[in-house]
Image (tube, rainbow, N blue to C red):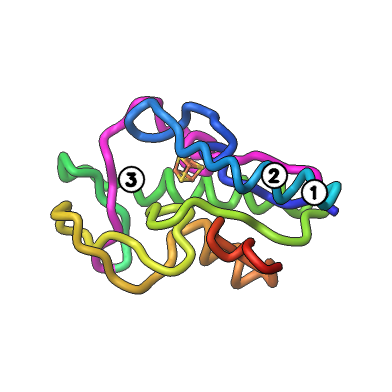
Amino acid sequence: MKAVVSACLLGENCKYSGGNNLDPRVAEWLGDRGCEAVPVCPEVLGGLPVPRVPAEIADGGVTARDGKSVDREFRRGAALALEIARREGAELAILQPRSPSCGVKEVYDGTFSGRRVPGMGVFARLLAENGFRVLEPEDLEGL
Ligand code: SF4
């Protein structure tokens, strides 16, 4: 079995800040099940640099904190990452919480004030719309 994984959860320094979101639970869960990770970072695939200006979803589009629209890059990256997921035959996705690309349950509200709202990131939504099971690391417990 293969799982698409937000690359930052596996320690790749692809976050907007230049860091990562390493979560040892993810690699452990995958290893215990003999499941192969397919790491993707949709924002980097979409052509955005590391580090980059943070972005949030507002009014259906994605805007960076400097006011510039990065919607096109986010959507292009999500589409490319979906292609990878399909090509690799991934059966599920394990994604970084709250990201405007990868968030599964919540995202920030677009005001850059730290407030969260229920919703999905651009990539997580695209995966879900295409029939992929999308999970966050906390969902792995008990699976
Ligand atoms: S786009 Fe996804 S994989 Fe890339 S840094 Fe953000 S949360 Fe991690």
Q: Amino acid at mark 2?
A: Glu
Kindly report which numbered mark, 3 or 1, lies closer to the viewer in this rendering.
1
Q: Amino acid at mark 3?
A: Val
| Quarter placement of the N terminus | bottom right
How far is mark 1 from mark 2, CA to CA? 6 Å
Measured from the top left, where is residue 6 in percent x and y?
56, 45
Kindly report which numbered mark, 2 or 3, lies closer to the viewer in this rendering.
2
Residue 56 forms part of the magenta stretch:
yes
The magenta-colored residue range is 35-59
Measured from the top left, where is residue 140 in percent x and y?
63, 61
Q: Are marks 1 and 2 in contact (CB under 8 Å)?
A: yes
How far is mark 2 from mark 3, CA to CA? 34 Å
Seen at 31% across and 54% down, the residue is 62
Residue labelled with disc 3: 70
Which one is in front, 63 or 56? 56
Q: Is residue 132 above or below residue 113?
A: below
Which one is in front, 117 or 43? 117
State the SS at label 1.
helix
Q: Residue furthest front?
A: 142
Which circle's residue, 3 or 1, is located before the other in the chain? 1
Q: Amino acid at mark 1?
A: Asp
Instruction: Tell me, for residue 32, which label it has, or none.
Output: 1
Residue labelled with disc 2: 28
Measured from the top left, where is residue 50 in percent x and y?
40, 26
| Quarter placement of the C terminus | bottom right
Q: Is residue 20 above or below residue 94?
A: above
Q: Is residue 69 above or below residue 91?
A: above
State the SS at label 2.
helix
Cβ at disc 3 under 8 Å from ligand 1: no
Name the image quarter holding residue 105.
bottom left
Which one is in front, 93 or 27? 27
Cβ at disc 2 under 8 Å from ligand 1: no
